[in-house]
Amino acid sequence: MKRISKLIYFLSFLIIGSCNSNDGIRISIINQSETSDSLIIRNLITEDPILILPFSATDTLIELNEPVVVSISNSGSSESNSLLGILLPNRNKLLKIDSNGGLKSHCLADSLLHYLFISNNSFIGENQNLIFGAENPKDIYTLFESLITKRDSVINSYERSLTSTEKEILDFQNSARVYSFLFYYGRLIRDLSPRHSFWDYLAQIDNNSNFNKSLPQNLLYKYEIEYLKKHNELESIADFIDFIHLNTKNIDLANYLTAIYIKELVSNPYYWEKHNKLFESVTFLEILDEQKYNPYNEIYNRITELHLASQKGMVAYNFNAKDKGNLDVNLSDFEDKIVFIDVWATWCGACIAQKPYFYELATKFKDNNNIQFISISVDSSIDIWKKYLSNNDNNNEKVKELYIQNGMRTEFGERYLIKFVPKYILIDKGGIIIDSNAPTPSKQLELMLNDLLIRD
């Protein structure tokens, strides 16, 4: 109770403004930063910009037909300074950018949403030994039920200051953010059978609530488990889309879920392993044709165009990067060579774990001038990248060490659909993509490279 009291004080300190409005959504800004020039509000799930607002326009009115959970950031600050918010029809939003570029919302619902997000992460961190060491997965759900209950009491303490819609969104987010982690834990960490009793909590997820639009992956994961429980294995992508519509009476939500599912297949293949085994180019084109009248197809149009452009047989994007001497290097500099690219970052544990195998593979081809190994860091800071190389110098002459600042968010990241790292890309001598999701450095890859060299 003492911790809850401190939290309530913290939230009260943040909230010094009103959200009320009678004529749409009025976004107001108090800007104390000299380095920021615009505010960016994005749909949290689709990542589409809802509003890009120059700070010179300190008061802007926008229209909105339904509630949306958003991320808010400014152009002159790091992504870590972004915040979550709720946009509601007929509710003002006052935002403040401090001298360091930090963002604060003067809306109670935003502060509570932020609390749900940070408390989820801190709870997992505080209990990680128990969570990842538990013998009985059902004990994990019981543990997280206590977090839901605690956060309920915080939200309820502010109920009189919230609209009914804000309260409903926060109640949904409270449990849904827990469910999001439980899906990750059950599907990916423990790989639990769809028939495992751990999944009993799925009955609590409403298939037809429009609030599912703010965390649609949860309902899609629920449907995956229920589909596999019924059919034992996934039969086709089209069958799963039919399953979505069969189990969602809310037609608008069913169309939205389908659009998100198509986007997820491309942008987060790691989370949809069972589905991607059936995800071939011909199948993909058939799905796009069947869904051309989906009212939400703008959610996946751009990423599917990029997906098709990054497939085998397409011309590889001629990226520009920096080497250790800050000189420009282009992909075209390696024409007439087979190119194998490792896209990584210093903060990525899996990337670092794979590095020795990458360098070992490069060494095996050190005397072959027909192949080039390239390592591209997508870190936010060139100094962090250089420091890592300095402390972990492999002195491998066969590897070209390159850097693209925030590479996952640049045209390089967009053209090659780099939504996760490590990612490996294989390009032939003519600059044509062989595989934009190549295997990790391994014996399998070594045999593939030898075969390519023989054929070339």
Image (spheres, helix red, strand yellow):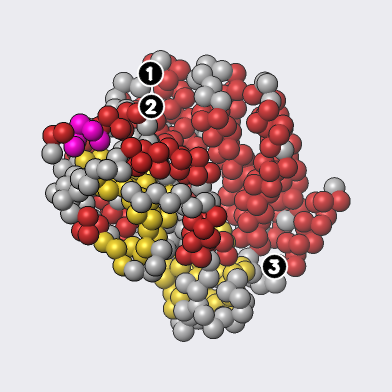
From the image, which quarter does the C terminus lie in?
top left
Q: Could you say whether the residue bearing mark 1 is in a helix, strand or loop?
A: loop
Relative side of 203 to 315, left or right: right
Q: Could you say whether the residue bearing mark 3 is in a helix, strand or loop?
A: loop
Residue at image location 62% in from the left, 54% down from the top: 113
Residue at image location 40% in from the left, 43% down from the top: 359
Q: Nearer the viewer, mark 1 or mark 2?
A: 2
Q: Nearer the viewer, mark 1 or mark 3?
A: 1
Marks 1,2: beta carbons within 8 A: yes
* Crowd around label 2: few <14 · some 14–19 · many ≥20 (10 Å): some
> At which x and y percent is residue 67?
49, 55
Tell me if residue 169 is in the magenta stretch.
no
- The span shown in magenta is 449-453
Tell me if residue 452 is in the magenta stretch.
yes
Q: Earlier in the sequence, mark 1 or mark 2?
A: 1
Relative side of 165 to 342, left or right: right
- Pick out the residue farthest to the right: 2
Of 372 and 396, the residue lying toward us: 396
Residue 289 in which image quadrant: top left
Q: CA gap, disc 1 to disc 3?
A: 50 Å
Residue at image location 47% in from the left, 35% down from the top: 219
* Residue type highlighted by circle 3: Ile
* Crowd around label 1: few <14 · some 14–19 · many ≥20 (10 Å): few
Q: CA gap, disc 1 to disc 2?
A: 8 Å
Tell me if residue 26 can be seen: no
Q: Which residue is mark 3?
A: 15
Q: Which residue is mark 1?
A: 233
Of 213 and 104, the residue lying toward us: 104
Relative side of 419 to 189, left or right: left
Res. 274 mark = 2
